[in-house]
Amino acid sequence: MKTIPFPSFQRLWFPAAALLLAFAVSGAHAGTPTNPAAFSVHVSGHGTPVLLIPGLGCSGEVWAETVKSLESSHECHVFTLAGFGGQPPVAGEFLSTMEQALGDYPTAHASPKPAIVGHSLGGLLAIKLSAKFPDLVSRVIIVDSLPFLSGAQPGATPEGARHYAAGLRAAMEQQSHEVFSTGIRQGLPRLVTTPAAQGIVFSWMQASDQATVVHALSDIIATDARADISHITCPVLLVEAGADPGAVPVELFAQQYSSARLLTRVRISDAQHFVMLDQPARFTNELNTFLAPAP
C-alpha cells in the first residue's frame, strides 16, 4: 500500500491530513452523483438570518448547540454540503461549485443581509463568499481556518501548493480501505477533545462520499485566498482554537489575516479544532456578542 507523506503543518494542517488519510482509504459511497443539489439546508428560529457552513466531511449537525443559542433572535440556515455527512455528491469542482451555489442562496432565501459562520473548510468558503459578494453579507465569523492552508508549511508557495495538491489527490485515489478506521480514530483526538464528540464526528465522516472529500481536500490545499481578505468590507470575527497539541500559532493567523479591514480575533485556549463542540458556551457567547446589534 502506498504511503502519503504528510508535512507537519501544525493543527490546521493536521485535520486536513488526518481526514485525507481517513477518507482516502475508506470505501464510503464513492461514485456517480445522484442528486443535483449542492447542499441541504435546515432553517429554524426567527430574526436576522445567519448562514452556518460546516467543515470537511461534517454534517450541519455540528452547529446544533450553536443554533440553540441563536434561534431566539436569529433565523438559522444550517447547511450540509453535497457529499458530506450522508448528503449525495454532485459533479464538478467542489469549491467553485459550492461558492457559486452558496453565493446564489442569500438573494433567494435570506433577507436582510445574512451573517455567515464557517468552520474550517466552511471558513474558507465564508472568506470567498464575503469577498466576492460584499453587498450580500453583513458579518463573517471564521472558525479556526486559514485562507492559505498550505502556508502553514514554512516556505510554501501557491504554485508549490497546487503541485502538491495534484500529486496528493492522485495518490489518495489509489489507496485502499484497510487503514481507514485506524487512521481516522488516531486523528480525531487532535481535532476534538471528548470521546463522545469524537464518535459523533467519526459517524459524519463515515457517512461522507470518498471522492467528494478527496476532491474537496485537494482544492483546499491548492487554494490561496489571502488576497480575498482585503476585499471583505463587513466586520469579521476570527475564532482561533488554542489547545495543544498542535494549535496554529498566533503569529500565523496574524500574518494571513493582516489585510483584514474590520477584524476581531478571539483565541479559545481550551478548545481544539472543533471549537463549537469543545467549548460550546464560550463559543456561542463570542458569537452572540459579535452578532448583537450596535447600541
Image (cartoon, rainbow, N blue to C red):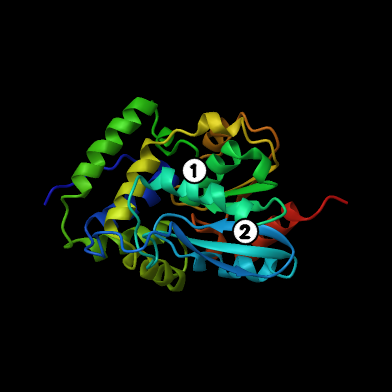
- Which residue does the image show at 71% across and 63% down from the upper left? 74
- Which residue does the image show at 31% across and 63% down from the upper left? 34
Q: Amino acid at mark 2?
A: His
221 left or right of 44? left
Q: What distance separates the C-alpha of mark 1 from that of mark 2?
A: 35 Å
- Give the x, y percent position of residue 106: 61, 52
Using the image, determine if residue 229 lies above or below residue 137. above
Q: Hey, which residue is sitting farthest right in the picture?
A: 295
Question: Which residue is labeled 1 in the image?
Answer: 248
171 left or right of 227? left
Q: Is disc 2 placed on a helix, strand or loop?
A: helix
Q: Label 2: how many residues lie within 10 Å, few (<14), some (14-19) or many (20+)?
A: few
Q: Nearer the viewer, residue 135 or 53?
A: 135
- Give the x, y percent position of residue 260: 64, 33
Quarter of the figure with residue 25: bottom left
The circle on residue 229 is: none
Question: Which residue is labeled 2 in the image?
Answer: 109
- Give the x, y percent position of residue 234: 70, 40
Q: Amino acid at mark 1?
A: Val
State which mark lies toward you, 1 or 2.
2
Using the image, determine if residue 79 lies above or below residue 6. below
